[in-house]
Image: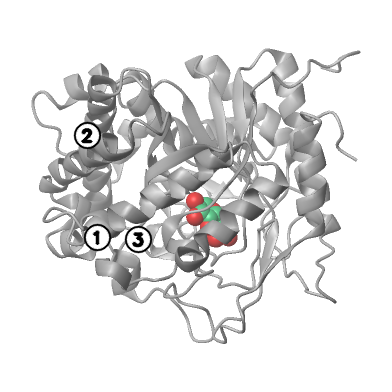
Amino acid sequence: MKYRELDTFPEGFLWGASTSAYQVEGAWDTDGKGPSVIDANGHTAPGISDFRVCSDHYHHVEEDVALFAQMGLKSYRFSIAWTRIIPDGDGLVNQAGVDFYHRLIDSLIAHGIEPIVTMYHFDLPAALDAKGGWENRGTVAAFERFARILFSEYGSKVTYWLTINEQNMMILVGEAIGTVKKGSPKSALYQANHHMMLAQAKAILACHEMLPSAKIGPAPNIALTYPETCDPEDVLAADDFNSIRNWFYLDASVRGMYNSVAWRYLREIGAAPNVEAGDMDVLKSAKPDFIAFNYYASMTVSKPAPEGAATTDSSDQQLVAGEENVFLGVKNPHLPSTDFGWEMDPIGFRNTFRALWDRYHLPLLVTENGLGAFDKLEDGAVHDQYRINYLRDHIKQIQLAITDGVEVLGYNPWSAIDLVSTHQGVAKRYGFIFVNRGEEDMLDLARYPKDSFYWYKKVISSNGDDLN
Ligand code: BGP
């Protein structure tokens, strides 16, 4: 539908930006921090940066927050490294780690920036992993304890809480992002998923009990799936993939029930988890206040390949290959791709907003969206017009979604500052601020605002009116 006039962005819209602890902080073993699965897996290929130094945000925190304030950010979405707070995941609390996030949060508040805290973004403590990780039901209690510590430490300063970042990607493509061991069987992954669902529910309940005015929600990666054609079999395959990739996670988080199509799929592949008596009551009783979601692009699938034809699992958050008897990932011929092969679909953003709103009727908070590109520093500047175009096209679609009647709380694109990508090093940059380092050569780690920084500043100060 085309409108003659668009609604404006609401007052108090959270124009922000995002990062995660393990990708931006560095200082991987500083001040008592324990190793996470990412540190322990040494998740990196030759010539690709590891996560030991990243953007060294840990040692540049005041400078970085001052730059965020200069950009005019109203919110900053970051994650807390579980291993800074509790180095082995369930033992003693590390005061230096606790103090670091107090410093960060205080500095944000002093600059008028709303902190949005992700409690867990891919970096499970390695010591818990050694005891079975999320497959071990004991990790649920460890997470609840960690959550309660965060609420009592930071609850008086933080209103917006996100439980688990991209739980769906950890299950579907965990090998690519380094959160699970190679060759983990699907039955183990989906058991881990059930435990994460319980852990999230317990955190939501604890948040509501301890902090009555705080707001908490899940933060999956949600991307609407299109059928390749109007062949009913393609439409069915798209519906199946939407259930398996998107609704399975949100139906459990919001409605406290497992999506029936996804559940049947799990039984079909022998991966339905063991659900103990009372588990579903816990899921049902925990009600999120909003849905946070990360969106990069839509997906497109067709009916599954004929029997015997080669299909592989998804190889990346955005590259979907296919699964025997279920669907086949295909390229969408209508969409351009980034330098890294991720399709770009701003209209798919609006489609995704509408689908989420229709299904759940909860306020929506965008916690990631952005363009990974090979940026070049030239005479102290980075001319990233391609990123401005990408962000502008997506912001226009948010305004259309708002006009459609969707309640949108804010937009926090990835990433506030350059950081290390999940599996493609520092060459794949997303930030508004350039960090001067290479894959293995740390250079001087100096910060340079990119053209997109100045453009976004105008967008924010005009509350989305000035997108040019
Ligand atoms: C999301 C993750 C982020 C992030 C982003 C970009 O899936 O939540 O941690 O890195 O995608 O992905 P990548 O770094 O692989 O380019």
Q: Amino acid at mark 1?
A: Pro
Specify the quadrant that holds the C terminus: top right
Quadrant housing residue 185: bottom left
Q: Amino acid at mark 3?
A: Thr
Q: Is 350 drawn above or below residue 167 in the view shown?
A: above
Identified at 62% across, 36% down, the residue is 74
Q: CA distance from mark 3 to mark 2?
A: 19 Å
Residue drawn at x 62%, y 53% as measured from the top left: 66
Considering only order in the chain, which callout, 2 or 3, is on the residue closer to the N terminus? 3
Q: Quadrant of the N terminus?
A: top right
Q: CB under 8 Å between callouts 3 and 2? A: no
On the image, which quarter does residue 464 sit in?
Answer: top right
- The location of residue 399, given as percent across then percent down, is 75, 25
**Amino acid residing under circle 2:** Leu
SS of the residue under disc 3: loop
Q: CA distance from mark 2 to mark 1?
A: 18 Å
Badge 2 local density, few (<14 within 10 Å), some, or many (20+)? many
The disc label shown at residue 179, or none: 3
Image vertical order of residue 25 relative to residue 282, above or below: below
- Residue 121 seen anywhere in this rendered image of the structure: no
Q: Residues within 10 Å of mark 3 (few under 14, many from 20)?
A: many
